[in-house]
Structure formats: structure tokens, C-alpha cells
């Protein structure tokens, strides 16, 4: 259903897009149009099929505990993306690693703390020092 | 003679200290990835691509390929010792490998898996060498018309064969193609679905999507459950006995040939190869009732098959620029990121890369034999690393890799969004590999399509008047209709009985 909505959105976006100056031959929206058409067709086929056959996909998380785990990971990952350039690589990575460990590896504070120090430093050395791929320094300069 | 000359040149490239080190690193990391359940070879290759940006493309491809076939070796260790396939292709190894371990024969099971893998991997490399030149000669005669039709065939077969449902596979391939169209159109210069975001002008990179769909989604899925791993720890006598060898020799031979052939086929892959090999061994066996109870042939055949398949996958990738598996699609994307054009011209333009890579496959297979068996104690200890410690490490390294590619936070968000999408896709049984194939092959498909039409003055008939192109398109139609025909035959044969 989501993909069907996506294909509908694509059709609308294509119709709203300005026509290219040279309209001879397939234009820039030819392939997106065909792709959206295929997605729409196959989504309808899948919907019809799912009405005839029982759902075979693995069950989505049922318990609140499972949802909490997933939401914790996703929220901290987005926070990581948001803070990586502001706080700098080392600090943001350390904080995110510790936050994840605090939830998934409970009551092992010393191990979690050591791992939160080891992870950013080791990855920083690997990328920035050995592979010469610069990582952000952030407001504090590290 | 020319092949030997090229191979010799390849060995001079692969045996240079730096390339040798990257080959060793690749197979070592690959083994770790294979050993640890839940990591996944596609995830690992996608995550590690950003780390290769500082290397030259030859060294990078040697390392990434090493991870690919190294994981095939490593996957058997987990399958035998904890009844969990480290990699999907090792799933058949669990059936008899774990039973052998319970009977105190973990050593011979691991030994025959390693030796079988070595033989199969070496055979696949020899065949790659032999088949490469003639295939390249044929592919060089292709124009944009033939290339377009070949890509259509590849997408139809790959999309259709990956996953349990043809509809879902094709749906995901189309979704990938659609994602590949985001950005400035290369011909008309028109803005397509960028929504004013400057980072999207060059399109959505395949790497953030791949890391999201594979690595992040896999972590989210694994985090749902708490993993308990009962590990078989007592391992003795790694060398298989003469009796073991006699029982396994035909299984290894058949597994090698079957695996190579399936690996070359689009959508074949190592998992299918190991399943087919296991079924054939059971059928050929004089005592099929032994299978599932610790038959060594049940380990030797599938393990040889999955390694031969990963070597076989290199044939269409290097000669035609067509991926036959999800991992080879990621490798294809990596080649393009390095600014190389995969396909027949790669042999002419980058002989150092192609022959260096081929020679490294021989070296890597030998290294794997050397490091896998003596270091078995380390792999067993590694299995005891608790997943809660691995989880933040995988997430952080995946996000760092995405960021480091273009120093772009937008790409980090793309990765995370696709991580969530990938998680729900896994729950809906929607395969992720066709999406990557769509993103990688979509822009090529569009370019060849437009070029073909420019050459033919806008006539769509060109795709049917060129014989090779027409054959490819017919094959694509058959590959889509095949499951329907099969379903129809099945229904017809069931109806009279009902």
C-alpha cells in the first residue's frame, strides 16, 4: 500500500515537473514514469495476492519492550547524525556508544565506559590517522 | 599462453606487500564476518567500502573480494559449532555439520568444510580465468541496444529470483531504479525529485542506501531478540581421515561444478548453490537416511558449492559488468565509486585490477586454508562476544562510513531512513538486494536506452531487430513468466486429483 502511494506521488510529481526543452525521444521523466507504473502494477498484484493468501512475512515486534529497544536505537542514531559535526566525532561517538550500551548491556558500567572510550578512539585512528579520511572536530576542536 | 602471461602479471600485482596485506586483511575480516551470526557479508562489504577510499582501486577490490569469499569460509564454523549459519549459504551445513559436532566430530567437519572450500574456490578461479577472455570478446561487440536488453534481463532475473516472491523481487528492483533516477538528469540537465536538497543533485548514493538497508536494518532486526549461543567447544582432530576423504570426494567435485555454474547465473548465488548441492548429494547417496544425522557429504558438498558460487559470481561481474548476486551488486557499485567502468573494457583499461584480483583469489583461498583451521580457537572465542557489545560498534562504524564517504550529514540521515525502511521490508519479506541492483544498474539502463534510441533515430524497433537484443528481451519475458507457467502446471496437475 505504501509503495502504491509512492507511485501515485511520483505520477503527481512528474505531471507537475516542467517539460524539458527538447521533447523528442524519451525525456528525463520517462524512466521514473515507467518505474512508478511498474511499482503501481506490482503493488496492486501484491495486494490482491495478500488477500488470497495468508501473510508469510515474519511478525512485526509485538511487545512494548521490543518497540522500546528499536526506538532507543533509532533515536540515538538520529541524535548521532545531528551531533556528529557539532560535538565532534570523538565526543558524539562516545556518548552514543555509551547510551546504547547503557540500555543493551545493563549494570556493567565499567565495561560500558571502557568500551565507549575504546570505540571512538579506535575508529578515529582507523579512519582519520591510518586511512586519512577526515572526521569532524566539532565545537571543542576534537 | 596469453592467460598464463596475464596471470603471472596478476601475481606480481597481488603479491606486492601492500596488496598481499589487503588480501590477508580481507579474508581475515571476511572470516570474522562469516563467523559472527547476524553481521552478514553484504553489510560488511557495504560498511567497509568507505574505508577503501584512501587505497588504490586494485587494493580495495582485492580486500572487498577477500571479505566476500572469506565470509563463505567463516560461515561454516558457526553452522557446525552453534547450529546457526554465520552466512545464509551455510544454512545446509547446519543440518549435518552440527550433528557431527554433537557426535564429537566437529574437527573433521570443520576440516572437510575448509578443504572443500579451498578446492572449490581454486576451481572457480581457474574457470573465471578460462571463461573471461572469450566472454569479454563477445561483450565488446555489444552496442547500447544489446547492453540495454542485457540489463533488462539481469534486472528481471535477479529481481525475480532474489526472495521468495517474483512480484516482491521485481517490485523492489523497480523501487531501486526509481531511486536511481533522483538527481540531475545527465542528458537534459533537468532536476528530478531533489526537493531542493543540494546533496541530492548528484543522486542518492548507493552506499548510504546499501548500509541502511543491510547493516542498520539487520542490527534493528537482531536487537529485537536476545541471542543465546550454546557453543560446542571441544574440537580435536581437524584433519579429515582417509575414510572422510573417500566419502567426500564426489560431494566436493559435484558441489564445486554445481556451485560454479549457479554462481555464474544471475540470481543464482551461494545459498541456492548449497541447497542444490545438498539435495543432489542426498539423491546420489546410497544411504540417504544418514543425511541430517551427521553425514560428512552433507557438509562437503554445500560448503564446496557456496565457495565455487562466490567465485562464479565474479565471471559476469568482471566480464559483463552484471552482478549475479547481492554482494556482487555492492562490489559493482564500489567499482563505480572508484571511477571505474565495470564490463569488458575493464580488462583493456585496468588489467592491473582484473588480473591482480584474479591472482589474489588464488592467494586468498590459500590464506583462508592457513588461517581458518589453526585459528579455530580464536573463532570459537569470538562467538562468545555478547551481541550488546557488538551492536553499538556496528552502528557507529556503519554511520561513520556513511559520513566519511562525502562528509555529508544528509547521507547519514538517508542511511538511517533506509535502515528503518529496510527493517520493515524484512518484516514484509521484501528483499533488499534488488533495490541495490536497481540503484546501481538503473542509471546504466537509462543511458544505454537513450543512446540506443539516438542511434536508431528514435525507433523502438531497434531492440527487437538486433538479434542478440531480441534474445535477451525474450529471455527476460520468459524469466518473469516462468513462475506463472510453473504455477499453472502445478495447478493443472493438482486439479484432476482433487
Image (cartoon, coloured by chain):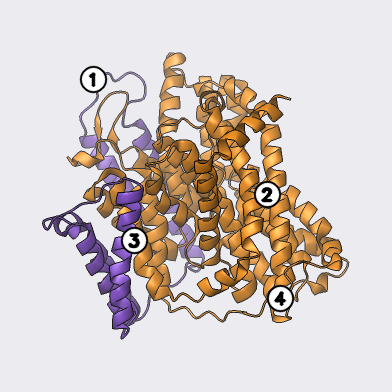
Chain colours: A purple, B orange
The answer to whether tags 3 and 4 share a subunit is: no
Residue hosting label 2: B121
Q: Name the chain under label 1.
A: A
Q: Which mark is residue A122?
A: 3
Expressed as whole percent of the image width and height from the top left, the position of residue B173 reads 45, 46
Res. B322 visible in picture: yes
Q: Name the chain under label 4.
A: B
Quadrant of the image containing the N terminus of chain B = top right
Tag 4's secondary structure? loop
Residue hosting label 1: A21
Expressed as whole percent of the image width and height from the top left, the position of residue A84 reads 20, 57
The mark lying in front, picked from 1 and 3, is 3
Q: Are there few (<14), some (14-19), or many (20+) residues within 10 Å of tag 4?
A: few
Q: What residue appears at the point 66 percent right and 32 percent down from the top-left corner?
A: B8
Q: Name the chain under label 3.
A: A
Contact check, label 2 and label 1, Cβ < 8 Å: no
- From the viewer's side, name the closer residue of B318 and B16: B16
Tag 3's secondary structure? helix
Separation of residues labelled 2 and 1 (CA atoms): 53 Å
Contact check, label 1 and label 4, Cβ < 8 Å: no
The mark that comes first in sequence, 4 or 2, is 2
Contact check, label 3 and label 4, Cβ < 8 Å: no
The answer to whether tags 2 and 3 share a subunit is: no
Separation of residues labelled 1 and 3 (CA atoms): 53 Å
Expressed as whole percent of the image width and height from the top left, the position of residue B440 reads 43, 40
Q: What residue appears at the point 25 percent right and 40 percent down from the top-left corner?
A: B200
The mark that comes first in sequence, 1 or 3, is 1
Separation of residues labelled 3 and 4 (CA atoms): 35 Å
Q: Name the chain under label 2.
A: B
Separation of residues labelled 4 and 2 (CA atoms): 25 Å
Amino acid at each position: 500500500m505504501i509503495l502504491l502511494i509512492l507511485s501515485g506521488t511520483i505520477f503527481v510529481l512528474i505531471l507537475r515537473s516542467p517539460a524539458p526543452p527538447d521533447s523528442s525521444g524519451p525525456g528525463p521523466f520517462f524512466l521514473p514514469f515507467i518505474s512508478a507504473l511498474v511499482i503501481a502494477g506490482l503493488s496492486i498484484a501484491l495486494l490482491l495476492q495478500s488477500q488470497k493468501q495468508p501473510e508469510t512475512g515474519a511478525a512485526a515486534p509485538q511487545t512494548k519492550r521490543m518497540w522500546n529497544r528499536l526506538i532507543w536505537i533509532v533515536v540515538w542514531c538520529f541524535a548521532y547524525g545531528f551531533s556528529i559535526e557539532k560535538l565532534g566525532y570523538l565526543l558524539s561517538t562516545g556518548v552514543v556508544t555509551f547510551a546504547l550500551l547503557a540500555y543493551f548491556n545493563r549494570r556493567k558500567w565499567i565495561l560500558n565506559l571502557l568500551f565507549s572510550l575504546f570505540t571512538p578512539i579506535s575508529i578515529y585512528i582507523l579512519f582519520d590517522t591510518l586511512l586519512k579520511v577526515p572526521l569532524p572536530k566539532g565545537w571543542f576542536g576534537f | 599462453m596469453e592467460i598464463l602471461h596475464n596471470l603471472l602479471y596478476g601475481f606480481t600485482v597481488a603479491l606486492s606487500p601492500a596488496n598481499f596485506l589487503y588480501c590477508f586483511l580481507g579474508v581475515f575480516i571476511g572470516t570474522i564476518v562469516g563467523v559472527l551470526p547476524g553481521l552478514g557479508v553484504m553489510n560488511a562489504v557495504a560498511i567497509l567500502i568507505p574505508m577503501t577510499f584512501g587505497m588504490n582501486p586494485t587494493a580495495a577490490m582485492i580486500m572487498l573480494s577477500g571479505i566476500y569469499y572469506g565470509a563463505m569460509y567463516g560461515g561454516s564454523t558457526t553452522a557446525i559449532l552453534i547450529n546457526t549459519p554465520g552466512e545464509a549459504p551455510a544454512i545446509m551445513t547446519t543440518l549435518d555439520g552440527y550433528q557431527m559436532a554433537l557426535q564429537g566430530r566437529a574437527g573433521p567437519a570443520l576440516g572437510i568444510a575448509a578443504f572443500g572450500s579451498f578446492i572449490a574456490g581454486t576451481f572457480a578461479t581457474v574457470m573465471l580465468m578460462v571463461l573471461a577472455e572469450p566472454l569479454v570478446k563477445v561483450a565488446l561487440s555489444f552496442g547500447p541496444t544489446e547492453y540495454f536488453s542485457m540489463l533488462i534481463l539481469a534486472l528481471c532475473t535477479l529481481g525475480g529470483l532474489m526472495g521468495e516472491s517474483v512480484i516482491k523481487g521485481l517490485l523492489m528492483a523497480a523501487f531501486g531504479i526509481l531511486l536511481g533516477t533522483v538527481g540531475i538528469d545527465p542528458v537534459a540537465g533537468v532536476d528530478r525529485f531533489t526537493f531542493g536538497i543540494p546533496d541530492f543533485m548528484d543522486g542518492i548514493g548507493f552506499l548510504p542506501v546499501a548500509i541502511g538497508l543491510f547493516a542498520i536494518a539487520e542490527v534493528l532486526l537482531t536487537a529485537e531478540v536476545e541471542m543465546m549461543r550454546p557453543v560446542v567447544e571441544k574440537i580435536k582432530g581437524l584433519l579429515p581421515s582417509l575414510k572422510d576423504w573417500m566419502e567426500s570426494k564426489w560431494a566436493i567435485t559435484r558441489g564445486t561444478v554445481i556451485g560454479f555454474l549457479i554462481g555464474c547465473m544471475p540470481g543464482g548465488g551461494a545459498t541456492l548453490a548449497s541447497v542444490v548441492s545438498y539435495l543432489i548429494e542426498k539423491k546420489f547417496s546410497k544411504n540417504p537416511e544418514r543425511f541430517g544425522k551427521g553425514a560428512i557429504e552433507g557438509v562437503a558438498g554445500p560448503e564446496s558449492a557456496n565457495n565455487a558460487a562466490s567465485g562464479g559470481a565474479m565471471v559476469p561481474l568482471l566480464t559483463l559488468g552484471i552482478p549475479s548476486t547481492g554482494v556482487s551488486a555492492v562490489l559493482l557499485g564500489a567499482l563505480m565509486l572508484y571511477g571505474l567502468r565495470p564490463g569488458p573494457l575493464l580488462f583493456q583499461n585496468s588489467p592491473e585490477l582484473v588480473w591482480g584480483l584474479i591472482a589474489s583469489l588464488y592467494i586468498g583461498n590459500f590464506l583462508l586454508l592457513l588461517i581458518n583451521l589453526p585459528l579455530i580457537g580464536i573463532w570459537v572465542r569470538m562467538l562468545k562476544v555478547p551481541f550488546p557489545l557488538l551492536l553499538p560498534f556496528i552502528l557507529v562504524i556503519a554511520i561513520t562510513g556513511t559520513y566519511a564517504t562525502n562528509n555529508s550529514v544528509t547521507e547519514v540521515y538517508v542511511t538511517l531512513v533506509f535502515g528503518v525502511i529496510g527493517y520493515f521490508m524484512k518484516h514484509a519479506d521484501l528483499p533488499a538486494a534488488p533495490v541495490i541492483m536497481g540503484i546501481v544498474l538503473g542509471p546504466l539502463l537509462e543511458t544505454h536506452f537513450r543512446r540506443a534510441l539516438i542511434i536508431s533515430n528514435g525507433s523502438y524497433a531497434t531492440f527487437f531487430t538486433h538479434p542478440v537484443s531480441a534474445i535477451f528481451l525474450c529471455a527476460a519475458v520468459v524469466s518473469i513468466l516462468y513462475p506463472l507457467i510453473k504455477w499453472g502446471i502445478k495447478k493443472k496437475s493438482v486439479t484432476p486429483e482433487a
